[in-house]
Amino acid sequence: MTTASNHHSVTYTNPIMPGFYPDPSVCRVGDDYYLVTSTFAYFPGVPIFQSRDLVNWKQIGNVLNRPSQLNLQGARHSAGIFAPTIRYHEGKFYMITTNVTHGGNFVVTATNPAGPWSEPYFIEGAIGIDPTIFFDDDGRAYYLGTRPNSTGVRYDGNWEVWIQELNLETMELAGESYVLWKGAMTDVIWPEGPHLYKKDGFYYLMIAEGGTGPNHAVTVARSRELTEGYTGNPNNPIITHRHLGKHYPVVNVGHADLVQSEDGQWFMVMLASRPYGGSYSNLGRETFLASVIWEDGWPVVNEGRGILEEQGVMGLTPVPVEPQLRCDHFDSDRLALKWMFLRNPKADLYSLTERKGYLRLKLKPQTFKDQDNLSFVCLRQQHFDYAAAAVMEFEARSIHESAGLAVIQNEMFHIRFERVLHDDKQVLRVVTCINGQETNVAQADVDAQRLYLKMAARGQELSFYYSTDGNQYHLAAEHVDTSSLSTEVAGGFVGCCIGMYCTSNGTASDNVADFDSFEYGGY
């Protein structure tokens, strides 16, 4: 981030959270801002970040980091955790979200945002998705969410936003529920991600509508009364890119949250996607920032422009955070906060202590195609052009065993760079999986036990390299198309993740794959 001569005019770059960080929610406590995002079928769930300037963020924890908090067994890739909201009230943090696979809507609480967070309080009767909590001036708390139209669903996505008082002692709904709004547009689809704010005597209800694709939009309504009388902003939607075409650099803009700085400035975080190499969004939905002013009692986003831009200007003094290391040498006895698993990891999935300085993955029968936990440790793809590299020691003992690197969008769309046993020889191969159909793109005999593996992406083309000494690299495959790993082709709500994996492909095995290091970075 660069700073102009006046420290009150700061230029920043969007997205502020690149990669698969969708459905952002933000709150401020004193000088600190806290942000959470959706994680779907990945564990741990709901990363939490801290910032002093809304631009430079440091991950301080994962809200749902215990299996007792988060059941993802059998979750589809784009199921699991939807749309968290974070709020602070009288010394306590509240995170509310939906586990669409198991249990529905629930709240967890903490006095320290870094954790530990409580066990989940599932809210009986809270149907639908995308919950949020609103604390009124009188101290009473309210649950807001979205649900199918209570007067009858006329078409797919015919939902509504509703509110009901929430007893914070019992985490139970109390009294009547009220329909607040069904959205701004005629025959609106998927009113979702509601957030409620109080300003200058008005209750402001901000939602997303139009679905999570190119028609995504942010709209707002207001009322003098909490539970009725909401009228839409005559200038709705207050931000969207639906009119800019699918080839605009930023698309799918929506699902926003507002926050006010200590000196009275207003800002908005929201999700959007950046297609590249054509209309392909491999990074999924990312977190963006915009400034907000108020005119005639309504919010105006990025005054004079009204759209998201790569370069933004804001009036907060930058407070940089320590940059993340590109390379992890696995010297700690705990994985860094950025690492994730697919669904709930088994207790014996990996070890950082059995061989010091290595991440040891245990071969399991599960594969990427199974809706189960497998031996896969990953992080988010955050760049169009990137390199991912690992040093691996592994020898396949049977034709069922494999280990290596992978980039995955979901169980039906992924690419693997793996060592296997073929014709009694140790070989490296590149395999694409497109809509469940696997193709062996390239294969080479490589006998060394210690392998240096590298994947390098230039836009939608991915090339694969290997070395046996870490100095001289050989090309395994080049220009492998990755557009099938985009949301536009693979569907769903997630972005690509890259990591280390191993499997015994449906058979029992006591073999292991040891990773000495993993490095990821953009260029």
Image (cartoon, helix red, strand yellow):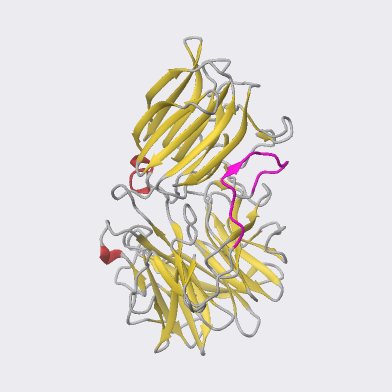
Q: Position of residue 305 (x, y in %)?
A: 33, 75
Asked whether residue 369 appears in the rendered view, the answer is: no
Q: Residue 126 location in percent, x, y?
A: 56, 64
Residue 238 in view here: yes
Say above or below: 273 vs 363. Answer: below
Q: Position of residue 112 (x, y in %)?
A: 71, 64
Q: Main secondary structure of the magenta part?
A: loop
Q: How many marks?
A: 0
- Residue 403 placed where, x, y %? 54, 27
The residue lying toward the viewer, choosing from 186 and 242, is 242
91 up-or-down from 374: above or below? below
The residue most toward the top is: 424
Magenta span has 238? Answer: no
What residue is at 51 percent from the left and 76 percent from the top? Answer: 196
Q: Is residue 155 above or below residue 262?
A: above
Front one among 398 and 288:
288
Q: Please, is residue 72 above or below residue 232 in the view?
A: above
Front-most of residues 485 and 233: 485
Whether residue 440 sits left or right of residue 263 in the image: it is left
Residue plotted at (41% across, 45% down): 385
Give the extent of the magenta segment. Answer: 321-336
Is residue 324 magenta-colored?
yes
